[in-house]
Image: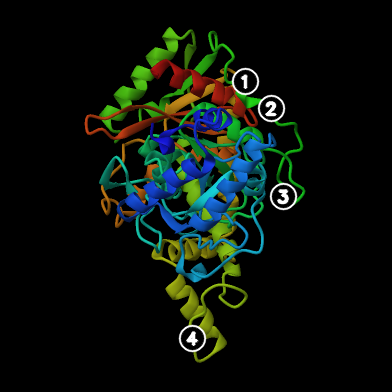
Amino acid sequence: MELNALTIKQATTGLQNKEFSSVELTSACINRIKKRNSDINAFISVTEDEAMDAAKKADEAIKNGSSKTLTGIPFGVKDAICVKDIRSTGGAKILDTYTPPHTATVIEKILSEGAVLVGKQNCDAFGHGASNENSMYGPVKNPHDTTKVAGGSSGGSAAALADNQCLFSIAEDTGGSIRQPASLCGVAGLRPSYGRNSRYGIMPMASSLDTVGPMAKTIEDIAILMEVMAGNDKKDATTVNQEVPMYTKEIIKDISGMKIGVPKEYMELEGMDEEVKHIIEKQIEALKKMGCKIEPISLPHTKYAVPVYYIVVPSEDSSNMGRLDAIRYGVQEKGDSLYDVYANSRRNGFPEEVKRRIMVGTYALSAGYYDAYYKKAQKVRTLIRQDFENAFSKVDLLVTPTSPFPAFGLGEKKDDIISMYLADVFVSPGAVAGIPGLSVPVGNTKARLPVGLQVMGPRLAEGRVLQLGHHIQQAQS
């Protein structure tokens, strides 16, 4: 039995039954990282000493009967999420030496359960990218084919999980950064509703879209994690003050009679990979056999989601990136004047994609252009949200492909910026609307590259989304 290949549920059962220890489980993950990280590049920092200490404490807690759901389970965290006294670079050289004085709320909750942090995972710098080729620590490679990308920006989190370097990952999704790499790497990934999980302690990109969520090997594991992570946080005024459902109980409810909408704008997209389309259509037919009612749905403003996203996000980006001046923290370059220190530090500390988004956002917010770009984008964003609200008045959930294509080659789209941005065409609409989205692995292409199905639901309906995803996954096992 390969301990590092276990799910959270399997590992928890094994630990409680004394079949193995957390030290053994953690060692299996650390050894896998040592063996494979030079090939995959999923981790920027590995916290081996801290992990082994935490594993020993977890074994003591299990021994004396004070363990909790996640006690002793090894996990990784996207490097754009802060953990106190652990190097957190955000994938950018400007923060190469940064160690936060605080821990993100969601990570505090997980650590308080006795989970074992094995390291910080590679990502596109500050979440800027769809392929994880914009990290200043090198690209993350897909464990299914190391000539392919892992997806972005949470590619390190997805690749580490798919390669069994940890049992779960905590990542962040602004426009698709959990769901898209989850699809390309063949794992499950949930973007919760905006406000369901606390954003405190994550490095902000676009504050009105940033969302923290889990990646795991099964939907059941996602449900377990959400029961721990979700909830109101006094440190984040955007979190909702609603009771966290028992997701593990909701996912086992019967789905027969559930109305599932299939948006024609997604399935008729020009340029979608034919194998991906076939796999998704086959899964939709399987849902019919499971008792679901399939309804055609239209989301007419879908085509505007990517343009809206790439106006709103760079605009908020340019504001958030202003704090990175290399004066208060970060790597400071030399200069003959204060201006030179600022300019040199940001020039050398940011990759090209970060600079591009700062420039686009600053332009969109500038005098004379604010109304034409940012304000208009926010109006269209409202129309996109209304499209989803209208759809959910007719159906319970929506299903779509997660990505229009499987993992593409390293460097294949790096110089074609528009093509790269379109990699998020199926995941950005839900992000713009602030609704939950789940990527469920549903098959592989002939080249053995994973394909994900996206399930979207009304705001705060994560339980229903996970319910359908769980039944889809169970039907495959």
Q: Which mark is residue 334?
A: 4
- Identify whether 79 is placed above or below 307: below
Q: Are marks 1 and 4 in contact (CB under 8 Å)?
A: no
Q: Which mark is residue 245?
A: 2
Q: Are marks 3 and 4 in contact (CB under 8 Å)?
A: no
Earlier along the polypeptide chain: callout 1 or callout 3? 3
Q: Which mark is residue 250?
A: 1
Circle 2 — which element?
loop
Q: Residues within 10 Å of mark 2 (few under 14, many from 20)?
A: some
Q: Are marks 2 and 3 in contact (CB under 8 Å)?
A: no
Q: Residue furthest bottom?
A: 336
Earlier along the polypeptide chain: callout 4 or callout 2? 2
Circle 3 — which element?
loop
Q: Position of residue 88 (x, y in %)?
A: 53, 61
Disc 4 marks a residue whose amino acid type is: Lys
Q: Identify the residue at horizontal 55%, vertical 68% (top origin).
A: 98
Taking depth in this image into account, of 26 and 147 the one nearest to the observer is 26
Circle 4 — which element?
loop
